[in-house]
Image (spheres, rainbow, N blue to C red):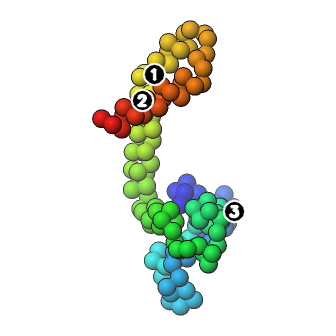
Amino acid sequence: MFPWVVIGKYCNGHYRPYAIHHMNYRNFGGSELLYRDVIPLSPVAHDWVIHGLLSFWLKPGKQRRYPNFFQRLAHGWCLLPLFLKAGVALIVLATVVATVIDLYFHLGWLELLSQGIPQPLKHLVGVCWNYLVSLFSS
């Protein structure tokens, strides 16, 4: 899930633990195939991300649908090759940077800072809202 986390190898003299996550329970206990039925994850990604945040801390038996939409997205992410993960990460990073730069120049942050008197938060939220509405309506 996290490409920079080393699992299951000796790294600097330490063995990195991992958890085996079942993406589905079709072949549970039978002939499970790696990267089709199960995937290796770091313990944090398994416990806190997949079975925590993405499942709203519900166990698979308590969920209405397992895996849910968010867990399916995470499973797809885990199955992507490293170069595709890097490409997606670069696209997301470039989009965030471009949006921040666009907001920085569009909202006139330089003028706000040069005045020395901070504008009320309500005005800032209103300007951001108007900008987002105009961005998505065009």
22 left or right of 12 in image: left
- Mark 2 Cα within 10 Å, few/some/many (few <14, many 20+)? some
Return the residue at label 2.
Answer: 131
Amino acid carrying label 1: it is Leu
Q: Of tags 3 and 1, which is closer to the observer?
A: 1
- Give the Cα separation between the discs numbered 3 and 1: 50 Å
Q: Are marks 1 and 2 in contact (CB under 8 Å)?
A: yes
42 left or right of 34 in image: right
Q: Of tags 3 and 2, which is closer to the observer?
A: 2
- Mark 1 Cα within 10 Å, few/some/many (few <14, many 20+)? some
Instruction: Name the residue nearer the viewer: 40 or 120.
Output: 120
Return the residue at label 1.
Answer: 107
The image shows residue 76 at horizontal and vertical percentages of 44, 65
- Residue at 36% across, 32% down: 134
Amino acid carrying label 2: it is Tyr
- Give the Cα separation between the discs numbered 3 and 2: 50 Å
Residue 14 - label: 3
The image shows residue 116 at horizontal and vertical percentages of 60, 10
Instruction: Name the residue nearer the viewer: 55 or 18.
Output: 55
- Residue at 65% across, 65% down: 57
Q: Secondary structure at mark 1?
A: loop
Q: Are marks 3 and 2 in contact (CB under 8 Å)?
A: no
Residue 35 - label: none
